[in-house]
Image (cartoon, rainbow, N blue to C red):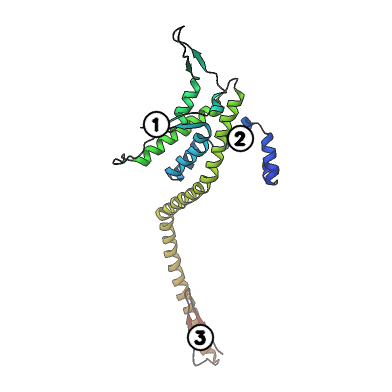
Amino acid sequence: MEYIKKLPRELVFIIYAFIPIDIRLKLITTKYPVTLLHSYNYCLDVDDCIKLYTLYVRNTLLLRVPKTTYDDFKFKRSISKLLPNIRYKQNINDVRTVSVTHEIEKKIVDIVSLKYIPRRRENWIPNNLQHKQREYLNNAVNRTYNMFTTIEGGYKKLQYILKKTLLFYLIALIRKAKPEYEKARCLRDYIRIKKHMKKYMFKELRKKWVQYNKRSKIREKEYIKKQRELLKQQKKRGKKIPKNIVIIRRKKRNLVHDYS
């Protein structure tokens, strides 16, 4: 897989087209588990998360049925044909027949539609609206993730459509939220290191700095004392001593320069 990334983009698309959808989904779900996807969702705004899920999952599978109070949703006709419908008559002489959809169709519509997600109304805003919306969306993503990755049966085309829908949603979420997640993680590590240094390291560094400052002052005094003793010895020997002795005081130590 590492060599595929180095190839041209067109060739990468052709190679991935030949890889089965189950293997592609298994590779991406092992690297990005559902807990990590929830962390990615927390890095984005709630409205962006809802738009992303609506665009790549709900709009791909469902159609909106307008109503007066709440809009209803149903499977697209091309997808609904892949599941068998049960038809029967309540009475033998009835002309109309009752059609019952497959049980999994109802469950997928309930999960994907986001029909009952908390929303603000005209004159009323629920308390902690963003938190409730995020929890509802995380629950929907979790159920979609668990159902679509483990669905089995004889309807291979339906399995392919559901798994492909989930795969494209995961790719879109990772591409949009991963940079923000990396920034948030770096900031979190920086704050943690800063707190640790402030609590432990700065005390130790302060002690070391005080000790070093004391030792440097002692070394300066000893150096000046040695220079004065050398001048006294030169006087006793009768050597010429310069009239002006300049002592240049630096940050760490004092130096005595003899201009003889």
Q: How many marks?
A: 3
Comes first in the chain, label 1 or label 2: 2
Q: Position of residue 146 (x, y in %)?
A: 51, 29
* Residue 161, quarter of picture: top right
Q: Height in image: 213 above or below 144?
A: below
Q: Is residue 175 left or right of residue 214?
A: right
Label 3 crowding class (10 Å Cα cut-off): few <14, some 14-19, many 20+? few
Q: Residue at x 50, y 35 (%)?
A: 59
Q: Are marks 1 and 2 in contact (CB under 8 Å)?
A: no
Q: Residue at x 48, y 84 (%)?
A: 247
Q: Position of residue 179 (x, y in %)?
A: 52, 48
Q: Spot the residue most to the top.
A: 92
Q: Amino acid at mark 1?
A: Lys
Pointer 2 residue? 27
Q: Residue at x 40, y 53 (%)?
A: 199
Say which of marks 3 and 2 sits in front: 2
- Residue 186: give its label: none
> Element type at marker 3?
helix
Whole-number angstrom distance, CA of label 3 to CA of label 1:
105 Å
Q: Position of residue 166 (x, y in %)?
A: 55, 34
Whole-number angstrom distance, CA of label 3 to CA of label 2:
81 Å
Pointer 1 residue? 67
Q: Quadrant of the N terminus?
A: top right
Q: Are marks 3 and 1 in contact (CB under 8 Å)?
A: no
- Residue 231: give its label: 3
Label 1 crowding class (10 Å Cα cut-off): few <14, some 14-19, many 20+? few
